[in-house]
Image (spheres, rainbow, N blue to C red):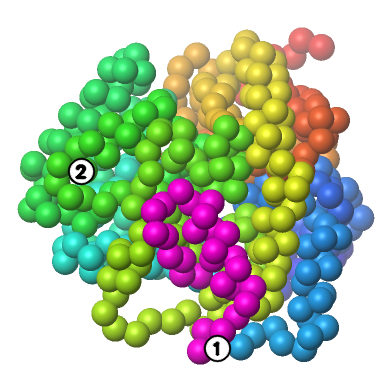
């Protein structure tokens, strides 16, 4: 009864708004590679990786060694008042990988803080509190980041330090422009951007922030080139472009190291977190040097980029590079996406199968239409779990099942996960449509 007992204790002391997955939530107590075990001894293949954070997987010898070596030195933390060799090394690597000219890096403990920092940089640099964001976005849980989040389910307050306007583009499946060709879709979104700039701003906007693939929003992505087309308009007004790479960074999208690169554009700043620490708390911003240096007061993150987190993160980058995990994400992502599309072609509750690399979403609908079906998504999570597979959920309506396994996924594991998910989707289809055929 260990899960039930822990759940009761959790409910008594944790906030009501901290949602747990599953009718019977589980505690994960052990892990190896892409597999985890819960406190009651059940084993699962993990296709959500602690919300895309265990990018390399569980119990990775090289990362464990880097962490234990730092622990053995007796120094977990010193603060940014002192030089930190592993932090400087990591910053140099990220600056180089970013492709941003003269880049500088600031480390935080989370994606939220990374985005708050990017907003601070852009608003200071431009001396403007106006920001553009995409509808259906998620950027974090603090006041600035909630203000730019475009998803009612994650907008806990309307209080805002910023004047925010949201534009179309990120969520094509439910866009008024959904029936257009890629080219016309981009054209319509650019026209919307121009209209928003002209009708809802004072012109001197600080920045636009985008997720190249919307994560919490349900792994939605626009046609390639949309953000380059946006940038042309932004450049006319001197508006900066910030890419939130918290979910899309480190090669997870397969084709590129950063999600925004699919659009052929170099942003002024990028924010990152999640996968970089493979579970250690680390995030940050990489930006053009003059933009990074725009803050005129002192500012620190006490823990940000501490010796332990940066030792681990350097080992994560080594592992990513040495094993070419970006190529693996491209190969197995295509295998999963193609397999899933073929297997669900006739499944009436599947409205859309989309994604890139190891970010794959299945949007569930009421049979015969496109009405969001969040109940089906919750049921698919349960059915997948019963088959030994952990997947995620998301989307504006909570009706998107999300797959984002560690990037070390093997072909056999991809096939095993795909089979379990397809069976779960089929089981929920039958339940939803009342199909009793054997
Ligand atoms: C795209 C994106 N940005 C920012 C965040 C916030 O990151 P954190 O939860 O580490 O504060 C998230 C978290 O899910 C995210 O998906």
Q: Secondary structure at mark 1?
A: loop
Q: Is residue 157 visible?
A: no
The answer to if 83 sits in the magenta stretch is yes
Task: Please identify the quarter of the rendering in which residue 175 is found.
Answer: top left
Q: Is residue 106 above or below residue 62?
A: below
Q: Secondary structure at mark 2?
A: helix
Provide residue 95's location: percent of width, then percent of height.
49, 58
The answer to whether residue 238 is left or right of residue 139 is: left
Residue behind mark 1: 82
Provide residue 23's location: percent of width, then percent of height.
69, 50
Task: Please identify the quarter of the rendering in which residue 263 is found.
Answer: top left
Residue at 27% from the left image edge and 39% from the top image edge: 231
Q: Is residue 344 above or below residue 365?
A: above
The span shown in magenta is 80-107
The answer to if 390 sits in the magenta stretch is no
Provide residue 339's location: percent of width, then percent of height.
70, 19
The answer to whether residue 227 is left or right of residue 10 is: left
Residue at 61% from the left image edge and 42% from the top image edge: 252
Q: Across the whole image, how many numbered discs are drawn on residues?
A: 2
Label 2 neighbour load within 10 Å: few <14, some 14-19, many 20+: few
The image's mark for residue 235 is: 2
């Amino acid at each position: 009864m260990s899960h039930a007992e822990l759940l009761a204790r959790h409910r008594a002391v944790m906030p009501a708004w901290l949602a747990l997955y599953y009718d019977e939530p589980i505690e994960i107590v052990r892990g190896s590679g892409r597999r985890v075990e819960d406190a009651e001894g059940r084993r699962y293949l993990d296709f959500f990786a602690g919300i895309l954070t265990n990018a390399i997987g569980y119990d990775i010898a090289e990362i464990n060694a880097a962490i234990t070596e730092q622990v053995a030195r007796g120094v977990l933390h010193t603060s940014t008042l002192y030089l930190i060799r592993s932090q400087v090394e990591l910053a140099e690597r990220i600056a180089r990988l970013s492709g941003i000219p003269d880049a500088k890096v600031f480390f935080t403990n989370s994606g939220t803080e990374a985005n708050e920092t990017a907003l601070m940089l852009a608003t200071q640099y431009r001396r403007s509190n106006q920001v553009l964001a995409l509808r259906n976005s998620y950027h974090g849980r603090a006041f600035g980041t909630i203000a730019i989040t475009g998803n009612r389910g994650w907008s806990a307050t309307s209080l805002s330090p910023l004047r925010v306007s949201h534009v179309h583009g990120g969520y094509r499946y439910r866009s008024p422009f959904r029936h257009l060709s890629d080219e016309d879709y981009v054209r319509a979104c650019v026209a919307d951007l121009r209209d928003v700039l002209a009708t809802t701003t004072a012109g001197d906007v600080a920045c636009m922030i985008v997720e190249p693939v919307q994560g919490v929003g349900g792994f939605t992505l626009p046609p390639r080139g949309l953000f380059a087309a946006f940038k042309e308009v932004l450049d006319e007004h001197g508006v900066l472009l910030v890419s939130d790479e918290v979910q899309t960074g480190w090669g997870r999208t397969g084709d590129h190291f950063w999600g925004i690169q699919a659009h052929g554009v170099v942003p002024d700043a990028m924010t990152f977190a999640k996968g970089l620490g493979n579970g250690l708390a680390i995030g940050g911003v990489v930006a053009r040097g003059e933009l990074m240096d725009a803050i005129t007061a002192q500012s620190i993150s006490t823990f940000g980029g501490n010796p332990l987190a940066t030792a681990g993160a350097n080992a994560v980058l080594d592992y990513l590079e040495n094993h070419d995990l970006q190529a693996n994400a491209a190969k197995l992502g295509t295998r999963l996406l193609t397999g899933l599309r073929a297997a669900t072609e006739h499944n009436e509750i599947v409205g859309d199968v989309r994604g890139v690399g190891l970010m794959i979403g299945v949007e569930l609908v009421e049979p015969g239409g496109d009405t969001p079906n969040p109940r089906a998504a919750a049921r698919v999570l349960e059915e997948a779990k019963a088959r030994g597979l952990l997947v995620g959920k998301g989307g504006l309506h909570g009706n998107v099942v999300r797959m984002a396994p560690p990037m070390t996924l093997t072909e056999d594991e991809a096939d095993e996960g795909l089979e379990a998910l397809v069976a779960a989707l089929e089981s929920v289809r039958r339940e939803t449509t009342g199909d009793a055929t054997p």
